[in-house]
Image (cartoon, helix red, strand yellow):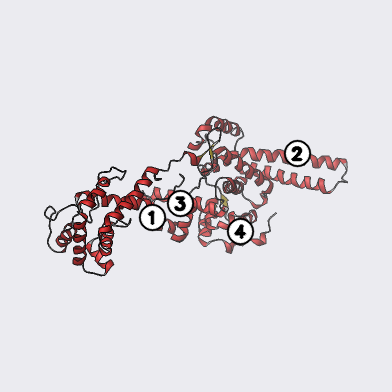
Amino acid sequence: MIDEDDATVEELPSWLLEAGRERGFVTVDEVLDAIPEAGDEPEDWESTLTALREAGISLREEPEEIEEEEEELPESAAPLNDLVRYYMQQISRTPLLTPEEERELAWKVVHGQEAAKRLKEEPDLDEETRAELQKIVEEGEKAREHLIKANTRLVVSLAKRYVNMGLPFLDLIQEGNIGLIKATERFNPSLGNRFSTYASWWIRQSILRALSNRGHAIRLPVHKRDAIRRMKRTKQEMYKTLGREPTDEELAEALGITPRELAELQRLAIRTISLDQPVGEDEETTLGELIVDGDAPTPFDVASLSQLREDVRNALESLNEREREVLYLRYGLDGGEMRTLQEVAEELGVTRERVRQIESRALRKMRSPRARRSLAGYAGGQIGVRVPEQTRPRPQLGISSSSSSSSPGGDDREKKDNASSEPPPELQGLFKGIKDRMKKRRSRPRRRPAN
């Protein structure tokens, strides 16, 4: 039984006490939100129940949890609808219990447990006493079975909250039933709580532990799993209230946690799927074998890019070191961003005009017949180098200053500077193609499994 000295009213949050005294009750969700540690161990939960009783506050499960009408099945149960509906029909044959019936059955369970304990500890009892105790044990077992059958609809209601979290719906129901059975063994009717309310904690914990053990590739602590569920529920409620997705700041404030703690919960909420997970009826194929990596280069692309780099280096051999550096920075030939004259000037520690002069001189050299011949094939896409259809607005390669619109002041001068040094037509697509291909190779993301 419970050591009532372990629980005090002072340990309960003030807002929970105020809400409970105003309404006369609090819900299980409110208690678990206010006292997360109450959901960790049975002793903590029972100690919290004792504190609520001392404060004159009753505990209830949400009113909509158990209804006489037919349960609406979650979408994830669609392939098993016939089996689940048959199960629902079977459990609905046992009517729901009134509070008085619950207490009567619960006391029979308690008396049956006490009688079984006495039979075990006192082997020298006379036959009449032993027969009487055995009858009490049998009545307790029948009462326990009745309690379980009458509350299986509560298990289904609670299991629906955890669909799409890693376990099939029927498995969630089975785990919840295990928790319900444990609740019948621990329930103390003298505390004044309804059995269905008390059992809801055991059902939740059994489901959550199963999800932590089997429903996640990376095992999460039970309290983290409960915090994630609370975060998702709060987010849904805020969406209904606000008519939009809440911001991270709004959600963190509603949960009473810091944005950093919220970010950690959001990270943990992402489901991880193993690429080695078997799929298919024969389970001889893994998930990783079915995922196409669209970013992986083909052998042809790798060879083309390698040859392109070599030819670019050879073509730039006619330039001095400073000219090569300016072209690499201006057009992002190293896989970086294309830069303006001002940005290149700041990088090299010279004036913008000096950068423009160096660039113009370098591009004049690149117009030589030798350079054009070595790179013309790439600009035409003959060796697998794709020439992008869209170009970046800065710098405006191949657009002469006479064709661009001018504006007064600095904007006009910047456009003039950017357009004053145009590369030969063969190099316009080449520079952009080199930049795109090199950047794609360097920043290509890792293959990630679908959530």
Q: Which circle, 1 or 3, is nearer the viewer?
A: 1
Instruction: Give the amino acid type for the residue marked by disc 4 in the picture.
Output: Ala
Say which of marks 4 and 1 sits in front: 1
Q: Is residue 149 above or below residue 442?
A: above
Horizontal and vertical percent position of residue 451: 46, 45
Tag on residue 51? 4
Indicate which disc residue 247 carries: 1
Label 3 sits on residue: 234
Task: Tell me which residue sits at (55%, 43%) in the image.
Answer: 158
Distance between the Cα atoms at labels 4 and 2?
A: 34 Å
Please name whichever residue, 366 or 380, is drawn nearer the observer in this view of the structure. Answer: 366
Name the residue located 72 percent from the left edge and 46 percent from the top edge: 110
The structure residue drawn at horizontal position 20% and vertical position 67%, both measured from the top left corner, is 354
Q: Secondary structure at mark 1?
A: loop
* Residue 341, numbered circle: none
Q: Which mark is residue 138?
A: 2
- Image coordinates of residue 322 in percent, x first then y, are 26, 64
Could you tell which of marks 3 and 2 lies nearer the N-terminus? 2
